[in-house]
Image (spheres, rainbow, N blue to C red):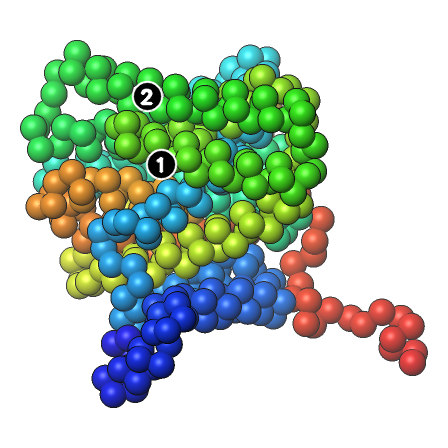
């Protein structure tokens, strides 16, 4: 590793070679440190564990950890896609479609907010002399939210209520838009602007292939749930295996693996409308994969070079994106059943950027290395910044909306129980 002397690095590499190899050991230690730091961040600062995971990944990336080189390929890329697919499958299974039918203004909120975010970021980047072929992919990336971060925040803060549920729904819809537009534009980025017909054709190809794979995943899981217990350990393994296989097949066929998982979760909820929850065993395995995903995202994002111009552009993108999300949700709040205060907290909860944005950026880099390098220069610092501070802002939103059942007080400084104090 770069942060060890060559002699010591060579010694350990030779000593560990008969077993798993030095990279495996470093990854195991990194995951262990991330788990410990995530716990300490929550215990001593009252912040969600994802903040600790991201900080550990960022430190490893800045220290020169070579376990995840950019652009992601091979095993690292599949692990990221698998983590995203698991999160989006669960998010799709929680998407309240009947709610949209009874309250269509929620969909209007989503469309208004996504459209405003896209054009606000696009025009802002033009003011900073970012060329059109680079500004458009960055604007699509800015539309994306981070359901993975938001779901971890809600778990750690024990939040539930209208703001929490609507923020999760809007984040999932934003992810749907960003994935379709991102993977579509990446397919013809080298050919320049396309007409309406070509654009619609590309959208239908990505959406159609992802829908077919998602439908097959939903049918397979629905068939399995007819004969297997939802709480069985074997059901958990089957569920993970099907999601992983669907992610790999969708990418191979030309679709989008995260989009296929998201649509698979939505379709499974339609086929099985009864409420269902992740089995306990799947929750443990999924937590490990998503923790590794957060570490991987921040590690890769920390490798981007910084300078004054890049820092200014990134701060402008992040600021305009935050304002646009809050304003978009607030503008469409009349008739949606949400007050303007709730709209502000929902916009704040949708601030995080994480794995979805990194996957979209990676797709552009693989499609066009030249333009991808320019996109990466701005995208990676923005992702790193908003994975950490976005999680903090989402936590503030949960407590500001008064939907957290856990008081915001570090556990280490809570008062001891009465019997312990007496003793």
Disc ID at residue 86: none
Residue 113 makes an appearance in the image: no
Left or right: residue 191 versus residue 205 is left
User: In x, y percent, where is residue 320?
Assistant: 31, 43
Would you say 79 lies left or right of 337 here? left
Q: Quadrant of the N terminus?
A: bottom left
Q: Earlier in the sequence, mark 1 or mark 2?
A: 2
| Residue at left offset 41%, top offset 32% | 246
Determine the residue positioned at 25% across, 37% down.
Answer: 139
Query: Where the C terminus falls, by quadrant?
Result: bottom right
Q: In terms of secondary structure, where does tag 1 sit? A: helix
Mark 2, other Cα within 10 Å: few <14 / some 14–19 / many ≥20 = many
Relative depth, front residue between 327 and 37: 37
Residue 148: x, y in percent?
Answer: 48, 44
Q: Please determine whether, in this image, residue 262 is positioned above or below residue 414.
A: above
Relative to 341, say whether 402 is above or below. below
Total marks drawn?
Answer: 2
Q: Residue 296: where, in percent of width, then height? A: 37, 57
Residues packed near mark 1 inside 10 Å, few (<14), some (14 to 19) or many (20 plus): some
Q: Which secondary structure, mark 2?
A: helix
Residue sitting nearer the eye, 287 or 151? 287
Look at 45% across and 71% down and name the residue there.
29
- What residue is pinned by disc 2? 209
In this rendering, the label closer to the viewer, 1 or 2: 1
Residue 248's tag is: 1
**Depth order, front residue of 254/364:** 254
For residue 366, say whether it is visible.
Answer: yes
> From the viewer's perspective, is 131 left or right of 294?
left
Residue at the front extreme of this rendering: 18
């Amino acid at each position: 590793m770069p942060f060890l002397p060559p002699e010591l690095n060579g010694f350990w590499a030779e000593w560990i070679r008969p077993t798993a190899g030095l990279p495996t050991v470093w990854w195991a230690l990194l995951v262990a440190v991330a788990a410990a730091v995530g716990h300490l961040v929550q215990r001593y600062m009252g912040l969600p564990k994802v903040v600790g995971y991201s900080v550990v990944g960022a430190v490893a990336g800045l220290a020169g950890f070579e376990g995840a080189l950019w652009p992601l390929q091979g095993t690292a890329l599949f692990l990221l896609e698998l983590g995203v697919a698991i999160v989006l499958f669960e998010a799709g299974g929680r998407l309240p479609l009947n709610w949209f039918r009874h309250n269509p203004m929620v969909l209007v909120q989503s469309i208004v907010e996504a459209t405003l975010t896209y054009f606000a970021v696009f025009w802002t980047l033009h003011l900073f002399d970012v060329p059109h072929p680079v500004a458009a992919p960055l604007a699509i990336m800015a539309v994306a939210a981070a359901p993975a971060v938001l779901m971890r925040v809600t778990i750690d803060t024990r939040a539930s209520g209208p703001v929490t549920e609507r923020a999760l729904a809007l984040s999932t819809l934003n992810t749907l838009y960003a994935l379709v537009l991102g993977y579509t534009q990446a397919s013809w980025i080298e050919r320049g602007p396309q007409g309406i017909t070509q654009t619609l054709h590309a959208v239908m190809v990505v959406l159609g292939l992802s829908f077919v794979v998602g439908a097959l995943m939903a049918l397979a899981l629905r068939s399995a749930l007819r004969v297997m217990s939802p709480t069985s350990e074997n059901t958990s393994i089957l569920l993970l295996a099907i999601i992983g296989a669907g992610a790999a097949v969708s990418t191979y066929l030309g679709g989008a693996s995260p989009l296929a998982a998201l649509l698979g979760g939505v379709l499974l909820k339609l086929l099985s409308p009864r409420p269902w929850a992740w089995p306990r065993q799947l929750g443990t395995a999924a937590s490990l994969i998503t923790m590794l995903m957060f570490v991987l995202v921040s590690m890769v994002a920390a490798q981007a070079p910084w300078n004054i111009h890049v820092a200014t552009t990134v701060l402008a993108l992040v600021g305009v994106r935050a304002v646009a999300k809050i304003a978009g949700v607030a503008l469409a709040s009349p008739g949606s059943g949400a007050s303007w205060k709730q709209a502000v907290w929902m916009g704040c909860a949708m601030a995080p950027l994480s794995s979805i944005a990194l996957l979209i950026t990676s797709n552009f880099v693989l499609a066009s290395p030249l333009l991808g390098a320019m996109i990466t220069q701005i995208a990676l610092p923005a992702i790193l910044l908003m994975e950490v501070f976005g999680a903090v802002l989402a936590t503030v939103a949960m407590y500001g909306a008064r939907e957290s059942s856990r008081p915001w007080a570090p556990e280490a400084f809570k008062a001891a129980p009465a019997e312990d104090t007496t003793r």
